């Protein structure tokens, strides 16, 4: 059985909303950075305190917007995960319904239960906590790098290099974990039977 498409119907709209959320979060991060810069650049002689106060208020407002956007990201990510898992569960049930009783009896109860409990939970986490967060975070990081590059190119290049090294290290570690995850899933399937 193949997995359903992630970019379909309501899920595509939710992914679009998450992408827009990422752009808005990047804007909030840049606004916070500008507010901090303005507050620190304000003279300390006492007369233009209004500028520092205004910058602090703008920073606080941007932080509140950021918190609201993070909340909305979690809500949309969970809705995306639940929509996807619902479709996977429906496909699994359709496939099981079409199986002959003898074929179904040959399959271990543990592996069938694992598909409906453990694997669906893992898929929901992959979509809600993996794909959604990666999309939003990727957009935020890319937009912030572009914003930093407008002020300081060397800092943006250093930031991009550090992110590339971290991504490469994560990819290398993920490849090593695949075998362990497969062995764990098989062991869990045997334990449930």
Image (cartoon, helix red, strand yellow):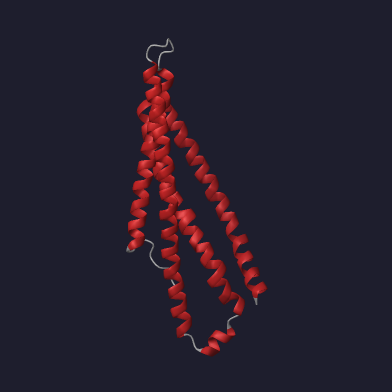
If the image is split into quadrants, where does the N terminus sit? Answer: bottom left
Looking at the picture, how far across and down is residue 164, in whole percent?
A: 48, 41
Q: How many marks?
A: 0
Looking at the picture, how far across and down is residue 6, in whole percent?
A: 39, 62
- The residue furthest top is 45
Residue at point 57% right, 67% down? 118
Residue at point 54% right, 72% down? 115
If the image is split into quadrants, where does the C terminus sit? Answer: bottom right
Q: Report the front residue among 67 and 26.
A: 67
Q: Report the front residue among 132 and 167.
A: 132
- The residue furthest right is 191
Does residue 174 sit above or below 120 in this rendering? above
Looking at the picture, how far across and down is residue 170, in whole percent?
A: 54, 48
Residue 179 visible in the snapshot: yes
Could you say which quadrant of the image residue 190 lies in? bottom right
Does residue 33 sit above or below 89 in this rendering? above
Residue at point 36% right, 49% down? 19
Residue at point 54% right, 67% down? 119
In the visual, does 36 lie left or right of 187? left
Q: Report the front residue among 74 and 170.
A: 74
Does residue 89 sit above or below 71 in this rendering? below
Looking at the picture, how far across and down is residue 93, in whole percent?
A: 46, 78
Residue 142 visible in the snapshot: no
Could you say which quadrant of the image residue 192 lies in? bottom right
């Amino acid at each position: 059985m193949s997995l359903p498409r992630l970019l379909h119907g309501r899920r595509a709209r939710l992914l679009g909303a998450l992408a827009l959320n990422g752009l808005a979060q990047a804007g909030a991060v840049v606004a916070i950075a500008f507010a901090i810069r303005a507050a620190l650049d304000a003279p300390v002689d006492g007369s233009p305190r209004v500028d520092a106060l205004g910058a602090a208020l703008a920073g606080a407002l941007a932080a509140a917007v950021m918190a609201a956007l993070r909340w909305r990201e979690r809500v949309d990510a969970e809705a995306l995960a639940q929509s996807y898992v619902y479709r996977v569960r429906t496909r699994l049930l359709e496939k099981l319904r079409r199986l002959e009783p003898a074929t179904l009896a040959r399959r271990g109860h543990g592996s069938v239960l694992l598909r409906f409990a453990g694997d669906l939970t893992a898929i929901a986490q992959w979509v809600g906590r993996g794909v959604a967060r990666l999309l939003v975070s990727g957009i935020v990081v890319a937009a912030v790098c572009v914003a930093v590059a407008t002020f300081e190119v060397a800092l943006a290049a250093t930031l991009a290099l550090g992110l590339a090294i971290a991504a490469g290290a994560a990819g290398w570690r993920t490849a090593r974990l695949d075998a362990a995850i497969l062995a764990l899933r098989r062991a869990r399937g045997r334990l449930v039977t």
